[in-house]
Amino acid sequence: MSIKIIGTGSYLPEKVMTNFDLEKMVETSDEWIRTRTGIESRHLASQEQAASDLAFEAASRALTMAKTAADELDVIVVATVTPDHFFPSTGCILQRKLGAHKAFCFDLEAACSGLLYSMETAKSLLAANPRYRKALIVGAEKLSSITDWSDRNTCVLFGDGASALVLAKDDEPESEGSICSIQLHSDGNYAEILQIPAGGSRKPVSEETLAGREHFIRMAGRDVFKLAVNGMLSAGKDVMAEAGVEAESLRWMISHQANSRIINAVADRLALPEEKVFINLDHCGNTSSASIGICLDELNRSGRLSKGDYILVTAFGGGLTWGAALLRWQQQQF
Ligand code: COA
């Protein structure tokens, strides 16, 4: 028995905001943003679009590629820090939009590590229960709705988007799965360095919290930077060691797209050449839980993934949460 990724999908909203647009909003420059982060532009959802709308587009594309009807799905996991509502879950709203009436659905909150956490969750569910055959995992974010557009420390970093993967169980005893190894980690001691201070039960909405702009992302950028490099590096090494795969055998490294300097620091320490390091944050920015799946889908649809390729995936995010997965691509070239 094995678990395979049989479809990928992603969606970026139409509207594009460039660094030059941001120059008109806060005291920043295209040069600063490009050199400090690698970002040149990001996509922004329209006022009418919520996370589930972005999720629907990405999920539909993944299901089409997987030749899977929505009512074949047994489970839907939506990773998001920008759900349509506190409840019902965005997973349930997505279920209605897709017509996936058989699936049980829930949201998973692990910030930017959300898709990796969802992968481990869905893989474990499929492996554990003989009744479950197919799962949809989605990372969907409308980060523009929790971005403080007057804070230059954060507003230049984020973008909106969604991605989705379809996972299926193959009962063949000799079949090879797509997920060789996953390791996930959390450390709540760092909860404050990346957070939204108000709006939850700790600090419900009040005039004071609104005036203090406490419903937006707050971040200690330099602290996050160091922890991100160390966390992704050690998790990356661990999954490769567990699978017995050396860094030279990797076809790609896909890291959470937060900052090209973070990604390159991890790649340098693994002695990976530039051509094996996938970066698309120049046109996406940081899309949190959506970012890794957007990368996978971009690579897949442009024919740059072949059966048998080893792909190292690493992620980190608020919580703190971090982790890595070693994938072995099982789809024939798309
Ligand atoms: N435009 C111009 N200047 C800016 C700026 C902007 N958009 N944002 C910050 N600055 C300024 C700072 O105020 C600071 O000025 P000061 O020295 O006068 O105080 C200066 O630039 C350098 O700030 P610093 O924090 O040292 O920059 P940095 O090299 O660490 O880069 C980040 C800042 C945020 C890009 C970087 O720390 C980072 O990417 N951290 C990780 C963030 C992340 O990944 N978050 C998401 C996690 S999922």
Image (cartoon, rainbow, N blue to C red):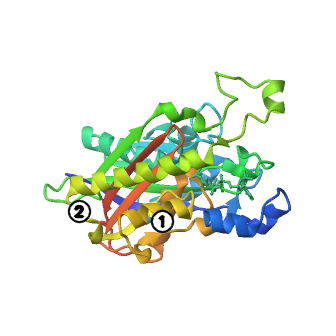
Mark toward the viewer: 1 or 2: 1
Q: Where is residue 65 in the image (x, y as percent from the top left)?
A: 44, 65
Q: In this view, does 327 lie to the left or right of 152?
A: left
Reading the image, the residue beneath label 1 is: 264
* Residue named by callout 2: 245
Residue 220's quadrant in the figure?
Answer: top right
Work out which quarter of the rendered image holds the C terminus and state it: bottom left
**What percent of the width, then of the height, locates residue 270?**
35, 64
What amino acid is labelled 1 in the image?
Asn
**303 versus 279 height, above or below:** below
Q: In this view, does 278 lie above or below 178?
A: below
The image position of residue 164, as x and y in percent, is 48, 55
User: Residue placed farthest to the left in the image?
Assistant: 173
Numbered disc 2: secondary structure:
loop
- Res 224 visible: yes
Query: Would you say 242 lies left or right of 286 here?
Result: left
Residue shown at 56% from the left, 43% from the top? 80
Residue 9 x %, y %: 50, 62
Going by the image, does 217 lie left or right of 47?
Answer: left
Using the image, determine if residue 195 lies above or below residue 97: above
